[in-house]
Image (tube, grey):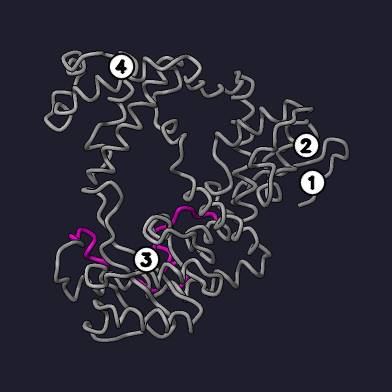
Amino acid sequence: MSGTTTSLLINNQAQFDELCEHIRTAGIVAFDTEFVSEHTYLPELCLLQLATPERAVAVDPFGVPDLSAWWKIMADDATTVIVHAGREEIRFCLHLGGCRPQRVFDTQLAEGLRSTTYPVGYESLVTRVLGERLGHHATRTEWRHRPLTPEQLEYAVDDVRYLIDVWKKQHSSLKRVKRLDWAETEFTRLIDELEHERNEDSWRRFGGLQKMKPRQLVVARELFQWREKVATERNQPLRRILRDDLIVDLAMRQPKTAEAVLATRDMNRPGYKKHAAELAACIVRGAALPESQWPKPAPMPDSNSEDHILSKLLQIVLANRCAEMKVALGLVGTSADLKNLVRWHGKKNSKQPPPRLAQGWRAEVCGDLLADVLDGKVRFRVGDRDSEHPLVFESIAESSPVAE
């Protein structure tokens, strides 16, 4: 997939349309992007890198006005699209293409399902899987600037040049250990998560809301929605319009005049100060809403010291099991997942759906073992201290090692 520097760059519509036809014929393509997120509401797409087994190129979106042929390829079910840590690539398809990608294979997720390493950077992954060492030196590139240098183009295309070979090894390995369906589940989950990340409850995701009362939450929601509207209209980053912590402070204090708004620390910055009157009006509007329109506080999970201790114990068990099965702990579950499992398990007749660790492939990895530990059906001890998974689990009833 080598070529001259000029052949690396596609910057007109005809070349791009021909490339898309080539990709459809190939049926498989590696995809990456370069973007800038500091100046706009959504990240600004500055370069697309695409590689098939025969070609590896960069596409200049400033020179190609219509990228719809590519988004249609991502949305069809005929072409495998390989990405690495591809959250932004999926977002571009959703927001710029207006469609949901289908056959996505994320090499970072895949590596976490066949090794204990997750997340893993692209350069480290290429070295680990292929033995290739990349000499990347253009990480601080201003990708909006034109023309791009030969070194910048080589750097960019390197980000897809090796992905298909990585995919071949990962796909073969996952198929051999019967984990391809695990990977497909995670790819779908990632797309689902990104597809629904912007919704009417998005305002609940930023920190500082947990201790708020409904009369404060309604103002926080109003401020959040105002900021989204202004940022979208002006195409500016959210933090440039108003920081999260300032929304929380204003929702708690609820100042009703511009002067009172400016009493908040940091609100006297020029970028924020000019919005003082709008913010005061927004607070007044939110505070005037009837109680029937107030948002309900998010339910606080039942928690006690016993749950905390048990989740810490399970964390040791889970770490050992992940090392034993060669799957990344960070991909299987978090401390919050373990607490959810402990709380759910303690309610034997609960009608709540099983938590993540008791569903799907995660249940295959650790569900039964964690449940047996909580039920007191197994005990564990230190076996081989030099092993990557030194714990040995034994059935209490039979006093014999638990079957692996």
Q: Earlier in the sequence, mark 4 or mark 1?
A: 4
Q: Secondary structure at mark 2?
A: strand
Q: Earlier in the sequence, mark 3 or mark 1?
A: 3
Q: Earlier in the sequence, mark 4 or mark 2?
A: 4
The residue labelled by disc 3 is 32
| Residue 238 picture location, percent across and down | 28, 39
Residue 260 numbered tag: none
Q: Nearer the viewer, mark 4 or mark 2?
A: 4
Q: Earlier in the sequence, mark 4 or mark 3?
A: 3
Q: Is most of the magenta stretch helix, strand or loop?
A: loop
The residue labelled by disc 2 is 378
Residue 155 visible = no
The residue labelled by disc 4 is 284
Q: Earlier in the sequence, mark 1 or mark 2?
A: 2
Calculate the distance from the C-alpha at mark 4 to the C-alpha at mark 2: 59 Å
| Residue 93 picture location, percent across and down | 41, 60
**Mark 1 and mark 2 residues within 8 Å of each other at the beta carbon:** yes
**Residue at figure coordinates x 30%, y 16% from the top left:** 284
| Residue 283 picture location, percent across and down | 30, 19
